[in-house]
Every structure is written in C-alpha cells, then in structure tokens.
Amino acid sequence: MSWSELPADLIAAIAGRLTELADLSRFRSVCLSWRSASAEHAARRRVPLLLGRFPCALSTRDRPYLFASNHGWMLAVKSNLSLTPVHPFVGDSANLPMVPGWFHGDIEERLGDMAWDWSPHGVMVSMPYMGAFFGRPGDISWRPIVGCSSTGVTSVNYCDGAFFLFDGKVTVLDAGTLAVAAVIEPPHALEAVPSWLLEVSLVVSPDELLLVWTPLSDWGLNGGRVRVFRTSRAAGDRSTSWSEVDGIGDRAVFVDHLRAFWVEANALNGLRGNSVYITRSYEEGHDDYGINVRGRYTVAVLGIADDPATGYLSSEKLVRVWWNNFWQWPSWSWPSPHSIASSWI
C-alpha cells in the first residue's frame, strides 16, 4: 500500500492532531487523497484575514486601494480610478467598465463611503448620494440600480443569487435581473434611535438575516451592549418581522465598514463564539493645529451576552496601530482557495 492509499478516516484523524497551520499545509500538499481527506479539518481551521494598509518601504503612489469581501475576492481601485476585482488566492482578475462621473473628486472621501460585493453575475458598487451601480467585464458602462436608496446604502452583500442592500431597510435584488425582489423594513427598536447613535451591520446567510447593533461609544467598551435582531430566510417562510435574540451560539460575526458576515467558532480556529469582531479606522490629530494627523486602526472583540464566569459583558481590544499617511480602511477577507466567477472572467 502506498502513502496515497491510506484510509481516508486515518488521514483525517492524523490531520486532526496537527496543531500548527504550517504543518497542516505541508500535510495537505503530499497528494490529492490526503488533501481531500483533510479538507473538512482545514476548513474549520480557517479564520478571516484583516486587510489593511500597513507601513512598508514601497511607494504608495502605485499601490491600489484594496477592499476585501467574504467570497475571497478583493476590489482594487487604482489612482486612475480603474476598478479591478482580483482573487489573490488563485490569481484571477477582471477589468470592469471605466468608472462613471460619480466617482471623480476626492478619491479618499469617495472610497471612505463606498460599499461593494462580488457575485458570479458581476460586481455591485454603491456610493452615498449616488445610489448603486452594477457592472461586469465587457460592459461599456455601469448600470444604475432602480428601486434602491440613493442616499445611504452602507453595505452590499451577495448570497444565493441575490444582492442585499442595506440603508436602514434591506432591499433584496435578483442578481441576474437586478429586479427588486423584496424590501424589508428595520426593527421598530432601531427606528426610534438617532442614526448617529447607531452602528448597524447586516449579516446575510442562506437561512436568515441578522442586524447587529454595536453602540458607537468605543464599540461598546464603555458599557454599551451589542444587540442582535433576526428574521428568517428559510424556504416557504414569508415573514419579514424581526425578533431580538439573546445570542448567536457558536458563531462569530466579523464587522468592517463594508459589511458583516459570520463564521463558525470552534476549538480549532480559536475564535470566540457569540461575539462580534469589529475593525474600524479613523484619523487622529496629535497637535493643537490639526497638522500632525495619523491614522489609527483598531480591532476589538465584543461579547453579545454576559460572561457566565464574571457576570459581565466581555470585551477586549485586540489590535491598536497608528501611523502617518492614513488612507486605507481595513476590511475582513475570507480566504477561499476557489474562484467560481468563470462565467464573467
């Protein structure tokens, strides 16, 4: 019997005993049978990666702005305002139509408010006060989306053949036809709260929608509490009512300025269940004249329910970084070894 002919359950058991990611990577590189048998174990080890602009010796002028997604793709925006989806894990890329006039102006100000997501059909991009636009390689221009808000789309999510645009309410678009399939109003509990007190993120999954409310007081680290509202997307369930839930179980929600998504929290990946990992960045002045301005990135993890051991809400700042020439907003990337966009590449 050769090494490649070992029983799949034995290979999986060995992979389960590997504690270092480098060892697991080498193990899965031996042959296809070992890679296949250890796929489930490797998937449970994956964690989102933080994409940000960190200091290096390279010139910044030729480096694009990069915005991640939870599909493995990133959107690269260059100084000439070209938009290119790239898949860093498999090397795929595509050229989108030239950006329309709404993108021109202060590029950092524009990008600070931009939202986007990838789909097998094409790319959706939204800009506050400009609306949402759809484009794909080969198109001459971007197609404006009819039926969505033109003032405040803060996130765009693709899932199971539909785009979900969030501007306080949820607008669902068929990804193939771009027709409005549904409009879901927000929970009443959020309607009564001033917008400047809210940081609400939409989480889309095949079976449900979640709205995660994180207070703006230093992300809940000063006594604020994360609140979660849920509505079902299960087949045959036509209800669009929201209900507040006490927790999200063995899941961790990752939030950035683009979107939110959840992943399984388990002993292999070390993530905290029933928690929110949130990353933000902002400019911070260090003199009385506002000339010495630096960028600040922070990553924090917030518990959704009280810690049973202490009886208090758990929260912790994981990363705090400062540097000059602030311009890149951090975003969470979900590493994917596959690209399924062959229909438009």
Image (cartoon, grey):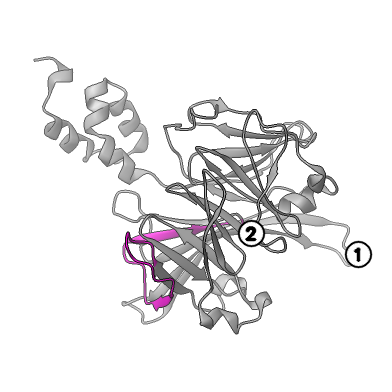
The magenta-colored residue range is: 232-257
Task: Tell me where residue 19 sits by quadrant.
Answer: top left
Q: Secondary structure at mark 2?
A: loop
Establish if 208 lies above or below 10: below
The residue lying at 75 percent from left, 55 percent from top is 130
**Residue extending farthest top:** 2
Residue 246, image quadrant: bottom left
- Direction from residue 44 to residue 321 in the image, left or right: right
The residue that disc 1 covers is 289
The residue most toward the left is 1
x then y, percent, for residue 321: 64, 54
C-alpha separation, residue under disc 2 versus residue under disc 1:
45 Å
Tell me whether the residue at label 2 lies in contact with that at label 1, contact meaning CB atoms closer than 8 angstroms. no
Which of marks 1 and 2 precedes in the sequence?
2
- Quadrant (top left/top right/bottom left/bottom right) for the C terminus: top right
Q: Please provide percent x and percent y for residue 282.
A: 71, 60
Residue 156: x %, y % from top left = 58, 54
Q: Secondary structure at mark 1?
A: loop
Q: Which mark is residue 147?
A: 2
Residue type, mark 2 in image: Gly
Amino acid tagged 1: Tyr
Residue at image position (46%, 64%) is 276
Q: Quadrant of the N terminus?
A: top left
Residue 49, placed above or below residue 295 = above
Residue nearest the observer in this picture, 127 or 180 = 180
Q: Residues within 10 Å of mark 2 (few under 14, many from 20)?
A: some
Q: In percent of the image, x 43 and y 63: which residue is there?
A: 209
**156 sits to left or right of 250:** right
Say whether residue 60 is visible.
yes
Q: How many marks?
A: 2
Q: Nearer the viewer, residue 304 or 207?
A: 207
The answer to which quarter of the image holds residue 284 is bottom right
